Amino acid sequence: MTEILMSSKEDDKEKQGSIVVPIDDDMDTIKSDSPNTVDELAMELATIKQSAKRIAIIGSRNLPITHQQMIEILATALVRQGNIIITSGGSSGTNAAAIRGAMKANPDKLKVILPQTIGQQPSDVQDQLIGVPNIVEHADRAMMTLADASRVCNREIIDDCNQLICFLSHTSKTLHNAVQYAEEGHKVITVFYLD
C-alpha cells in the first residue's frame, strides 16, 4: 500500500507531495552484513535457468496413492526435460514414486543414494531397485541406525543436487532438517506440505 503524506504549511516545500511506501517488518531485506546475498541470488537464478538440473526428490513415506501418482508424474516429466533425479530407496511414498517416474522416462537419468547397503533394504525395496543403473551404497553406515543413516543420506543427496523438491508434513523433523540444510547450501528449494 502506498501512502501519500500531505505537508503542513510549516513543512518545507521539499517534503510536499512525497510518497512513502511502508515496509512491513517481516519482509525479507538485504542486510548490510550480508555481502554475498546478491551473489547467492544470482547463483539461484542461474540454477533455475539451467536447461538440465540435478533435482533431488525426497519426502515422506506415508503418502496416499494420489500423491504418489503426482510425484511419479512429476519425476517422469522432469527426466523427459533432461534433468537427473536423485533420491533414496523406499518401498512406498515419495522416494518410491520418484524412482518409478524416473525409470519410466529414462533409467540413466536416475541416481539412487541408499542410506546403507542394498542388502539392508527390505525385500520390496530391493525388488524396486532392480534395473536401476546408478545406485550408491554405503557399507560404512551398516552399523548405524536407519534413522541416523537416513539423515546422513539426505545430506549427501542434497550436496549432489542443484534443486530440492521435498514432500513432508509439518511434524517431520528429519525432513525439516534436510530442508534447512539445503537452505544453508543455497539450493533452489520447493517444499510441499502434506498436512
Image (cartoon, rainbow, N blue to C red):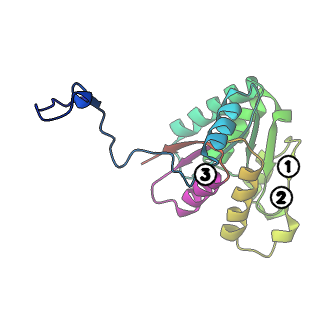
Locate the N terminus and report the quarter of the image it occupies: top left
Which residue is disc 3 drawn over? 183
Compared to 165, does 115 lie above or below? below
**Gap in Å between the C-alphas at discs 1 and 2?**
9 Å
The residue tagged with tag 3: helix, strand or loop? helix
Choose top left, top right, bottom left or bottom right for residue 84.
top right
The answer to whether mark 1 and mark 2 are in CB contact below 8 A is yes
Measuring 24% from the left and 31% from the top, which residue is drawn there? Answer: 15
Name the amino acid, label 3.
Glu
Q: Mark 1, residues whose alpha carbon is within 10 Å: few (<14), some, or many (≥20)?
A: some
Could you tell me residue 65's position as x and y percent? 54, 40
Marks 2 and 3: which is nearer the front?
3
Measuring 71% from the left and 58% from the top, which residue is drawn there? Answer: 155
The residue tagged with tag 1: helix, strand or loop? strand
**Gap in Å between the C-alphas at discs 2 and 3?**
30 Å
Mark sitting earlier along the chain (3/1): 1
Q: Is any part of residue 89 visible from this angle?
A: no
In magenta, the rendered stretch is: 165-184
Residue 135: which numbered mark, if any? 1
Farthest left residue in view:
9
Marks 1 and 2: which is nearer the front?
1
Compared to 193, does 152 lie above or below? below
Residue 167 is covered by the magenta coloring: yes
Which residue is disc 2 drawn over? 118
Name the amino acid, label 1.
Ile
Name the amino acid, label 2.
Ile
In this image, 192 relative to 77: left or right? left
